[in-house]
Image (cartoon, helix red, strand yellow):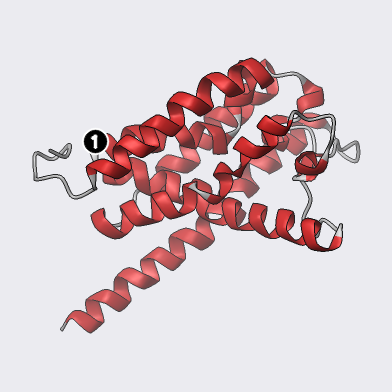
Amino acid sequence: MSDTGSPARLPLGLKLAFTAWILGWAPTYWVLLGPQNYFWLCNLANFLILVGLWREHRLLLSMQWLAVALVGSLWAVDVGTAWLTGIHPIGGTEYMFDPEQPPLTRLMSLYHLILPPVAGFAIWRLGYDRRALWWQSGLTWLVIPLSYLLTDPERNINWVHGPFGQHQDWMAPLLYLVLLMGLWPVAIYLPVHLLMIGLQHWRIRHRH
């Protein structure tokens, strides 16, 4: 049963498979990278998608669709281009080619390719909740300051010390942090949100 009491609309196999993934991924990342790594919004999405799948929670899954759809696509483009040409057109995925990073860490980071299809499938079955933009933005405005306060600066988690994994020194750190908090929802979430609204309107027009 879903959180609304209606019959389940997401396959049990998907829920079990994603649960098995979390049971393997979460402790492995804790051992290899430490608990600070969970502050990454994409890592947090793993846990929230798990809850959303089991509860069939449309709002929570819509939020995480915003979090992973564009980020996962850009991650794939950057890694794929670097693998083929040796050039990172976007940046931020250099760790995938760093021999000092444990191979298992790099292998498990391929979840960036998995989350968008999982969240996208869930949204296709359950529908998109338009409130997701505001709720995910609010979650981001909570996580980004916490990342700044509670994680090591050299890890630059959620790019709170500089974009694309690089530290910045061209503006005051707190000013940069405020700009980051404003830019993240506009640049990452809003395009996906507008696309989903457009698809909803298209479905309504073609339903009649």
- Residue 87: horizontal and vertical position, in percent? 86, 58
Name which residue lies at 51% across and 46% down. Answer: 67
167 on left or right of 46? right
Instruction: Tell me the quarter of the image containing the N terminus.
Output: top left
- Residue 159: horizontal and vertical position, in percent? 72, 37
17 on left or right of 159? left
Name which residue lies at 25% across and 57% down. Answer: 125
Q: Which amino acid does label 1 sit on?
A: Arg
Q: Residue furthest right?
A: 169
5 on left or right of 42? left
Instruction: Tell me the quarter of the image containing the C terminus.
Output: bottom left
User: Residue 99: which quarter of the image?
Assistant: top right
- Please tell me whether mark 1 sits on a helix, a strand or a loop: helix
Q: Which residue lies furthest to the front in this view?
A: 103
38 on left or right of 101? left
Q: 99 and 115: which one is in front?
A: 99
| Residue 57 visible at all | no
Q: 143 and 92: which one is in front?
A: 92
Name which residue lies at 44% across and 50% down. Answer: 65
Name which residue lies at 28% across and 46% down. Answer: 58
- Residue 109: horizontal and vertical position, in percent? 62, 39
Q: With respect to residue 206, does 119 lie above or below? A: above
Residue at the spot of label 1: 55
| Residue 28 visible at all | yes
User: Residue 64: which quarter of the image?
Assistant: top left
User: Residue 13: which quarter of the image?
Assistant: top left
